[in-house]
Amino acid sequence: MSIDTASKTEGYSLVQAIAIGVNTTSPAYSLAAILAPMALLVGYATPIVLIISFVPMALTSLAFMYLGRRDPDCGTTFSWVSRAIGPRPGFLAGWAIAAAGILVLGSLAETAVTYGLLTFGLDSLAGNRTLVVAAAALLIIAMVGLSIIGSDSSIRLQTILSFVQVAILLAFGIGAAILAARSYFPTFDSAWLNPFSSGLDSLVAAMLLGVFAFWGWEAATNLSEECRKPSDAGKAGVISTVILLTTYVLVAVFVVIYLGKTQFKEVGDSGLVLVDMSGVVFGPFAFLVLMAVFLSALASTQSTMVPGSRAVLSMARRGALPARLGLTHPRYKSPWVSLAVLGGISAGWYVLVSSLSENAMLDTLSSIGILVAFYYSLTGIACVVYYRKHVVSSVRGFLMVGVGPLVGSIGLAFMLVVGIRSVSDPADSASGSSWLGLAPPLAIAALVILIGLLVLLVQMLKSPRFFRNDRERANHAQSPFLLGHDIVISPGGALIDCNATVHEVLGRVADHASELQGHEPVVLVFGIHPSGLSGEEMGAARESLIEDGHLVFTETERQLRTLGVRDPIRLFEEADARNSVVAAQERTCPSITV
């Protein structure tokens, strides 16, 4: 089911999906917020720690990309974990995605309001706590309305805001470099490249800040059903992380050089190092940094609704949550019920927490890291489990859908454990108090999981069908690397009919060796639709044909390599043996058919 199936020309382009992935991380705000505390923790190693923090995220992005190719579901982690590991872990993963969005929206809206007022010189209003809280709650509601409408102007605005804030950040990095060159360059030593120079605890704490800075890029992958090409969502997620890494590291290098002369003490009182340095770097144009933080938080307030609302939509339409939550707007095709519910809960939570303590919102943000690490690590594990046949069938599969996602999951799980330990002392929390006998960040995370478990039990009793679904795995035809609708084959190559025994196919290849060496590309075709069968018999026969085709392809590729033919294209056709060749000929227009 697609949110918008009107036509292939409608929906988000790759650039627009990237913009949403970038904006959801709120790069200007995130970078401004983490640089000073990260520098205090690891000093000159800050840029290298940012890169290290990026590694598990990048490895996990492989899981998002390859799972999205086979199952372009807007629920992403919920759908993939449900299929590969089981419906119950999948439910909790989807619940964590929705909860993380609810928890962070208030902080983003508050930042947008505060820095919007500061940008326009309304400092006295920015200091009025009651006004800021009320305006932030209203901003959340307004952004919900804008997300429901989902107009072209809205996505164009998202795209423009992403380019503007990244441009300002890059300009800031260049300005900081010029400033450092004129005034202070530290002596280069091993501390720049040694993330352990300040100890393991400091390194892990800094990495958790880095994970927070990168969190949100996967919002692009939630748009698989709204992109013009479903595969663009996975690509956008990966490209988003690369853009963020490049921007973050460039700015961090020169900011850290500048901070080094103050022994990494904060420049001012705002807590946002880029804001405190803005006057020194930009002079009369210091307002640009305030504007970047404002635009960053504003754009993220809307785009951060994407993952949670789409996860709830997917859960509802598959029976894991009440079906009403999966309704889409008849005109705008947006998941308006899930957006309205999540937005309303988020605004209510923000007002409640803000009334308890001015610092309680910071404790809410600390709990998000626990939820994010949880569902990210589950995604990596789901990738390995789902593609386990492909993990052992090739070096590429072993690395890209095996080792990569698994290492990313292990790294995130490690940070999850250490993160829980680091926020376990109530005295170290932002509010300095305990909630229900726990540190506030742990209490919030535990409350989210507990409510999720209760809802899970209720849904298992009310709608047990979803929770009885069997786990799935990708067969040999369901390659994570090559999709039938994504294959672009140049005409004029060679087509090899592999609908026979391995011995017969290899014999024909040997007989036509000289002809095959002169043609490119070489396409291997195998039909996987059994004739005269239906129901379970057809399913079993199809699976058997896929296994047979995989074996023939593998042996044929080995022989082709001895002839100097590189990278033959595998083509499983949904047809019987004879018609599969006819279909492949129409599609590839080969010069010769073997």
Image (spheres, helix red, strand yellow):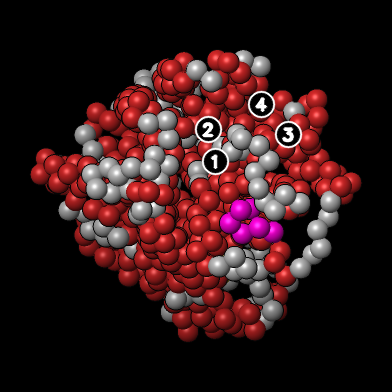
Q: Work out whether mark 4 precedes mark 3 in sequence or the reverse, and give the earlier one.
A: 3
Give the SS element for disc 4.
helix
Above or below, 496 relative to 486: below
Give the SS element for disc 2.
helix
Which region of the structure is painted magenta? Answer: 39-44
Residue that badge 4 annotates: 291
Nearer-the-camera pick, 554 or 95: 95
Residue that badge 2 annotates: 300
Residue that badge 1 annotates: 25
Q: Nearer the viewer, mark 3 or mark 2?
A: 3
Q: CA distance from mark 4 to mark 3?
A: 11 Å
Which corner quadrant of the image does residue 163 belong to? top right
Q: Identify the residue at image location x=72%, y=37%.
A: 277
Residue 346, how many percent across, how many down? Answer: 36, 29
Q: Disc 2 vs disc 1: Cβ atoms closer than 8 Å?
A: yes
Above or below, 199 relative to 298: below
Q: CA distance from mark 2 to mark 1?
A: 7 Å
Q: Identify the residue at image location x=32%, y=59%.
A: 84
Q: Is residue 344 magenta?
A: no
Secondary structure that dominates the magenta span: helix
Residue 278, how many percent across, how many down? Answer: 73, 34
